[in-house]
Image: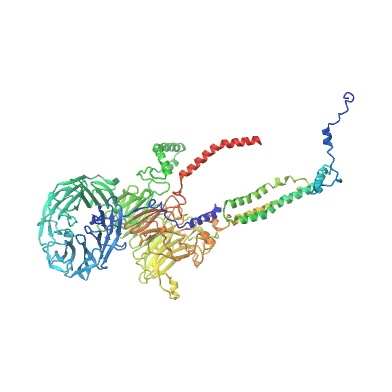
Amino acid sequence: MPQQSPSNPPPPPQWVIDLNSPPRPKTKYTNITNPPGYTEASSGKRTAASSKTPARKPPTTAETDVLKLKKSWEIALAPAKALPMNAIMMYMSGNTLQIFSIMMVFMLFKNPITGILTTNEVFRRFESEGTRKQLWVVKACYVLMNCVALALGVWKVNGMGLLPTTRSDWLAWETERQPLERVVFAFR
Amino acid sequence: MRLCAPILLSIAAVLNASLCHAIFADEAYQTDSHHALLGLPQAHTTFFHRPSAASKASLLYTLSEKLVLGAINPKDGAVIWRQRLADVAQNHTTSGLLKAGEGGDTLISAVNGKVQAWDATDGRLVWEWDGGDETKVVDVTPSVEGGKYVSVLSEGEGSNFVVRNLAADTGEVFWESSDSSGDAPYAVVSSQDRIFTVSLHSALLKGLKIKVTELAPSNGKTIGQSTSLNSDSDLTSEASILHIGANSGRPFLIWTDKALKTLKVNEIGTKQITTLNVPSSNGESAQKIIIHAPRSPTADPHFLVHYQGADSHWAEVFHVGTDTKKAYGLPHLGGKGAFSASSQGPNVYFTRHTAFENVLASSIGPTTLSHWDVRPKSHGGMVDPQDISHAASEVISRGGSTYAVRSALTFASGDWELIRNGDPYWVRPEGLTGAVAAAFVDIPKEENLADELAAESHRGVIAAYVHRVKLHARDLQHFPSWAQNLPARVLGSFLGDKAGPQDQILSRDGFGFHKLVIFATEHGRLAALETGTHGTVVWNIQAVSLKAGEKWQVLSIEAEQNTVLVRGKGGEFLRVQSDTGMIVQYQPGGLVKSLRTSVPVVDTSGEKLLIPVNEDGSIGDIPKADFEIGTIIVTDAEDHIVRAWALWKGSKPTLAWQFTPAPGETVKTVTARPSHDPVASIGKALGDRNVLYKYLNPNILLITALGREASTATFYVLDSASGAVIHSATHAGVDSNLPIASTMSENWFAYSLFSETSSLSQDVTGIDQQKLKGYQLVVSELYESPYPNDRGPLGTSSNYSSISPTLADEDVRHDTPHVMSQRFLIPGPISSMSVTSTLQGITTRSLLCILSDTNALISISRAFLDPRRPVGRDATAAEMEEGLFKYSPILDFEPKWTLSHKRELMSISDVVTSPSLLESTSLVFAFGDVDLFLTRVSPIGAFDLLGKGFSKLQLVLTVVVLAVGTTVVAPFVRKKQIDGTWTA
């Protein structure tokens, strides 16, 4: 046999066949009813999706761009979503100087600032030819939201009295008025 | 940096919460030192005496020339009790009397018109008899034998003199007998139930006659005729009576003639007079004769006559018998000497103290019982045995030929030393009483590092390098001793004992607690105390020699580099090395007659010129120099006018302004801000973070003027450059005899007085209120503007002139500050006020007050005295943040404010302060007529110093345990980590 047909490729091994033809999915319409409590829909959808994905035709660039934009908006607005929680926490922690309030204030400053600094990295994965034009609005919104979070931090710090906004904070740089006259006292 | 302002505020709030700073129990007697002095002991009132019949040991009693009655423990020289018999203000002229009945348990003292009996053991007043201001007690004698009564002879009550018999235990008057014969009373003698009065009758021509009258002890009636003892010209003055045996068994009277040629002896009660010639051997005649006789009534009637010549002294011992005869003589010895008599039973002993030896002799024969050579200079050279004034001694026979002799020697220097059997035991520096001026001085540095480093700056690089290497090589010589002391020092710091090398060398310390206090006394002495080592006397010199009765008037003591300048009245000045007391320069005063003092003024070239100030407040001739524009001298003259002289206007000083108080008022005191008065912050940060700007003018003056007739007191605040009154306050109903004290610092001033509690303005409204009177403390603060964040019309300008206002419109009184005042009712009078001073002025100042009625020094925190304390309501949160709390009109002096804690500071009149190197702490020295007190005060707690509770040992142990633990555990952890990596 091998001599007879040397050019003929041997039949592929079983595992190759298995690999190439996955087991036939369960037919959707089967007579066997599902056991009670088992819902077909989710699993069916998942299997359908997984099975369909390779089958589905790849989304167009326009579609992905829309998707990317949608995702990037989500990220851009995330700091704003954290604001109410932060505000409540800050309000609750009080204006006294304690290790907790100091740490929280520190985080309140650190997160927005690092966010602003890493704006481009955060949105890099959403960047493409199509999204580039709209993405700057998203980035601007992201920066703005971080600034709002920063403002919360500033408000908190002000509440704690740590901002040099009052006259007494600059007292050390004010100097005593010097009299031009010099007086020597000769009494005892 | 200012971001931490709230942090600082909260720290300040915490500190204010602990504003009741007190002396901690473990600090008392450690950080403070007290010289509880008595004053120079007087010869006739200093003696050893058993406090009660039952007690075995005797105490040393004295009534000093400061009229302080005290009992000293002869073992260690500590004061057991003391009482001041005269008020501080009272100008006492009498020397006082102190008598102790043998076997009694009370001491009888007499000063002016007052006779007081004191418990000899604890110094409590047993009874008092007060004859009033007119009366003057001439003599007082407790009766012999246990003491049933005390005879008091007094003059000045209508008749010439009165003899009273008071009960010895209650002071009740048994009887009184007056004499209006015109004689001057001299003494009352009580002897074995007989009472004699000795009076001096002025003879017709000249001289005095001694008259002795016997009184019946039961009712004071005269018994028989009074006897005149001497001829007319015999006795010229009272001082010629040398001795009167007041309560001895056989009292005798000794007097001499004017030329000190003869002695006349009379046993009181008899008419017999023995005349003795004063020996004048070696051609030297006696200049002074002193009689020493035992006080005890049971002792033999023997006495010693001490003749003091110009260069030597000698003595004779006499026995009083049927006739008085000389027993033996004691040889001539050079120099001054002092004798003292003491008795044990009938035996009488005389002790002779000279610069070379101490000799004990019995009154019976000329044999010397004991003899001790005098040590050269005892107590580290502080006591010089050369100049003995007088002595008191106690001799106890130990059977056979051994005797225990204790003598208390008083030296002309004021030292009071006890020697026991010739050995120096203790010394009390009684000459330090009567301090009039004091100053803190830094201890001079041994080697001036700054000078060495400055020398390098003038050299080349290589030369400077070589110099530096040499400097360090030279420092190496200290290394062995430093290394030797190191273990002891480390150990000492851990175990907390200061028993390290306590060398006698004066040296500075890292905290600046070691300084010298140099003070001048009215006796013309200068002395230095070390503040670090419990106020030990470093040196004590006679700076100026004064005539008898004269007092040294010192205007100021100023610290200079390694020296101090002492300025006396009349232009006198003295420059003394601060560490040794060596006089470097001396210029006597009185060279220019009307000169009062001279003040140093710096001219434009930086040279210091002495400007003379005359008695009438004018300026003398000034040297030709250029003075800066606006150099003004303020003087205060006797005529109650304060004058200011401008030096810059020409070659002669011109009168810039003069201040005369309102009609009827006289200027009492003039106060300026202290010379060291640093201001850390020019404004006060309020609770809402706004700023109230302080009015900080170094030229302001506080003048206290008293209207004696209207009984008012007015306090004026002047800008002394222009002479403008920037604030004044008048109080009505002021008692000007009670102390009025005032002080000024930074932007505030305080004064205390006794006055009506309602102010004048309330009286004007006609409200018929009760005029309550009390001691008040008034505190005022000056601000640039009443509004926060406002610097007044001058705004942000960096300088200003009081004379030529920069503002165009004259209506605006731009230099008038906003004054906030508050008054507090205080429980007692404050006789003097002072302010703590710290290096940077960051620490809140405390007001130091001397309380004259409790003899204490207290420190009142400024937090209590803030005029901005809310009145009639509780403080708001913002105010509480500032440390303000509700005003209460009554300010009770809390006991824990007392810096002197249990100590009694007798007759303290002045306080000087000095900063230490620690910002929290100020050094305080209180001085006055009698006592000296040194302490440290931390107005808001010693925040820059580890407390005594800090355990260095614990800290080191913790570190060691942690280090050991880490090294032990580290291999295990490493192993576990590696294992974890493999198993994962």
Asked whether residue B933 is in view, the answer is yes
- Viewer-proximal residue among B530 and B173: B173
Q: Quadrant of residue B662?
A: bottom left
Horizontal side, residue B814 vs residue B855: left or right:
right
Q: Pinpoint residue B983: horizontal percent, then vertical percent.
A: 65, 35
B872 in relation to B941, above or below? below
Pick the front one: B824 or B746: B824
Front residue of B350/B659: it is: B350
Question: Residue B878: where, in percent of width, then height?
Answer: 54, 61
- Residue A106, percent from left and from top: 61, 50
Is residue B80 found left or right of B890 in the rendered image?
A: left
Residue B850, image quadrant:
bottom left
- Is B834 on the left-hand or right-hand side of B131? right
Where's residue B471, x and y in %? Answer: 42, 38
Residue that extends furthest to the front in the rendered view of this protein: A36
Would you say A44 lies left or right of B144 here? Answer: right
Image point (40%, 49%), residue name: B513
